[in-house]
Amino acid sequence: MRSHSLRFRMTLWYAGVLGLCVTLAGAAMYIGLATYMERSLRNSLRAEARGIGENFLTLWKQRGEAFALSEINDYAPDIQSRYLRVTRPDGTVLYLSHPPKDGSFNPATVPMWKTPLAPGQGDSTTVRAPKRVVLERLGYDAGDGHVYIIEAGASYQSIALVLHGLMLIFLIGIPGVVAVTVAGGYVIMRQGLAPVREITEHAERISSRTFSERLPVMNTGDELESLSLSLNRMITRLEGAFDHINRFSADVAHELRTPLAILRGELEAVARQRQLSPDLLETIGSTLEEVDRLTRIVEHLLIISRLDAGEALMTSRVNLGEMTASIVEQMKLLAEEKAIAIKQSIAAEVEVEGDPLRLGQAVVNLLDNAIKYTPQGGRVEVAVGKSHDRALITVVDTGGGIASDALPHIFERFYRTDRARARDSGGAGLGLSIVKAICSAHSGAVRVESSESLGSQFTIELPLAQPAPMAANGDTRQAAGALRSS
């Protein structure tokens, strides 16, 4: 999901930058072309006005006005879609061209130039007649000291048509170029991020139980290859650290079992002596209870350490419904002491592949925890069912619930929401840690939902067993009967 979001953001950024750059380049090209074409047209008109003065006005002085006008008409400005007007020094029009053949403007509507110009002085302007016309005016001395004004003009329509075509090309071409480029960039980006996606998928599958796996190394010779190698080295170090911790915990738990057994035996031997005072007997009894409590803690630590270390499970096909029903029957005696009602809703044929002893232990721990923290006269509900390809075991109680700040830590070792009450009830904060370790060993999970004063709900999720012609159910009842002491 994050990879898709990154690609989407990068694609948007890339498209935005590319679109802006192409738009700015197109705008610069449009303005540059418009300026160049108008300047070229004005230079042409200016040269044309000068040519009219040099060729025709001089000819008019030499051979008469009629001959000069006929020569100018032969120049045919109307056919070339040009405008030409020559004004005498007294302000009267010597010559005015006919309307151009394309009808782009009307020469008669072009306003007269009233400001006198010095010989050789020019002026540039743009008028509407009725459409836009580019004009160049030139003052010309025909040799008699009088200044004639020569006006040469042309419709701006030819430039406008070119610019309009260019604008259409931009409007159609720029989005197409951006779309093709972005699509190509997205494909390239997707291919470039594919190794990152593969590394992420492999990293998500690595846990404390699968530290032997390594991330794929991309032989690209770039930063991705260095990243993969660095992460693999880090995983190797973590694997060593976890192995060391698991071995240490297992070794400590194993080594403590013998001295605790010896201590218990010696205390029991002392307690059997008749000459002991009542106070000393009470002290020995209290010490034996603490020894029993330490023994249970050591056993639980040993179980967790073995599960975390990947202990081989005695796997068989387990009918969760039958196993849970058997455990509920045994736990009812404990519930009746507190007048707690246990209700059960167990679906048939809910089977998983797993160790019946460990799975039963997980259910016993959840039920024992629910009964322990449900007040007198409360209720505990147990359900077994299916959801898609997962088997579900749910235990709901009507106890005091768990504070929201404690929920993230509830499965941590030795964590207790109420340490004083937990110690009075003999708890060490390892029961739920064992449940989590058992679920992880079976490729499952356990989750909790709780609110203060509203009770708690624990749910175990396990992969369903593949359908088999004959259900080979293990002796789950017998396995469950051996778990009450846990």
Image: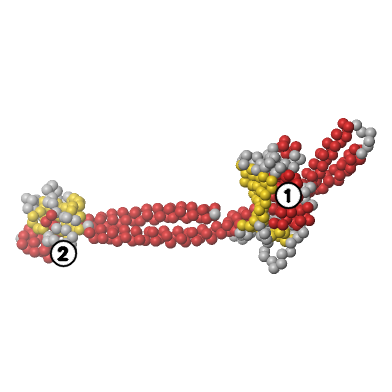
Place of residue 135 in the rendered image (x, y in percent of width and height, measured from the top left): 18, 54
Dot 1 amino acid type: Val
Circle 1 packing at 10 Å, graded few (<14), some (14-19), many (20+), is: many
Q: Is residue 208 left or right of residue 152?
A: right
Q: Nearer the viewer, residue 187 or 479?
A: 479
Dot 2 amino acid type: Lys
Residue that badge 1 annotates = 364
Find numbered disc 2 in the image and state the secondary structure of the residue it sits on. loop
Place of residue 325 in the rendered image (x, y in percent of width and height, measured from the top left): 71, 54
Place residue 223 in its image quadrant: bottom right
User: Residue placed farthest to the bottom in the image?
Assistant: 469
Q: Residue at x 16, y 53 (%)?
A: 138
Find numbered disc 1 in the image and state the secondary structure of the residue it sits on. helix
Determine if residue 100 is in view.
yes
Place of residue 81 in the rendered image (x, y in percent of width and height, measured from the top left): 18, 62
Q: Nearer the viewer, residue 338 or 45?
A: 338
Q: Residue at x 77, y 50 (%)?
A: 483
Q: Quadrant of the N terminus?
A: bottom right
